Image: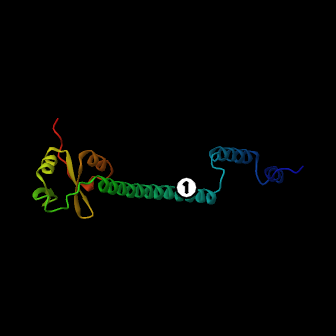
Amino acid sequence: MGTSFQDQLLKSGLVNKKQVKKSKQEKHVSRKKNKGEKTSPEINKAHQEKLAKEKRNRELNQQLNKEKQKLENLVQVRQLIETNRLDIRDVNRYDEPYHFALGKKIKKIFVNDKIAQQLSLGQLAIVKLDDQFEVIPARVAKQIISRDQNSLVVLHEQEE
């Protein structure tokens, strides 16, 4: 079997035993230091890029899931309002204006005395759906709050 390169250099007289020993020591130390890093820098860089891409994809998926959940909540809110709203469109039957604040503006809807009193007591609530105001039961309004707080306009707290 052939001799090592270090042995050949030692036999030819180009290096001495002290230099060979120092070289072996440095090689041993560098191996210990790089024990965990067996891959080349190019492979490391590619691996880091892959990890960064996966992280970006996870973040995008989370964002898409949040948007999807938000849209689902809006659809559920619309369905809750449409199925539980009171019919107050007949202007002749509902002649008493009920005033409420929407931001800095005062708005009004026409209701009867009974509905106005239930709104004041917190048994009914006013919500906004497609630039229209709808009157719904308070229990439905609480379900809507859990899905989309921006839809709720007026809900007085009931005193117990």
Farthest bottom residue in view: 131
State the quadrant of the C terminus.
top left
Q: Residue at x 11, y 51 (%)?
A: 113
Q: Residue at x 30, y 57 (%)?
A: 82
Q: Which picture quadrant has residue 103? A: bottom left
User: In the figure, 17 relative to 128: above or below?
Assistant: above
User: Does residue 2 appear to the left or right of 107 in the view shown?
Assistant: right
Image location of residue 157, percent across then percent down: 18, 43
Q: Amino acid at mark 1?
A: Leu
User: Does residue 127 appear to the left or right of 53 in the view shown?
Assistant: left
Q: Which picture quadrant has residue 101? A: bottom left
Which residue is nearer to you in this view: 106 or 89?
Answer: 89
Image location of residue 22, percent across then percent down: 69, 46
User: In the figure, 160 relative to 51: above or below?
Assistant: above
Q: Residues within 10 Å of mark 1 (few under 14, many from 20)?
A: few
Q: Residue at x 39, y 56 (%)?
A: 72
Image location of residue 21, percent across then percent down: 73, 44
Q: Which residue is mark 1?
A: 51
Farthest top residue in view: 160
Which residue is nearer to you in this view: 154 or 97?
Answer: 97
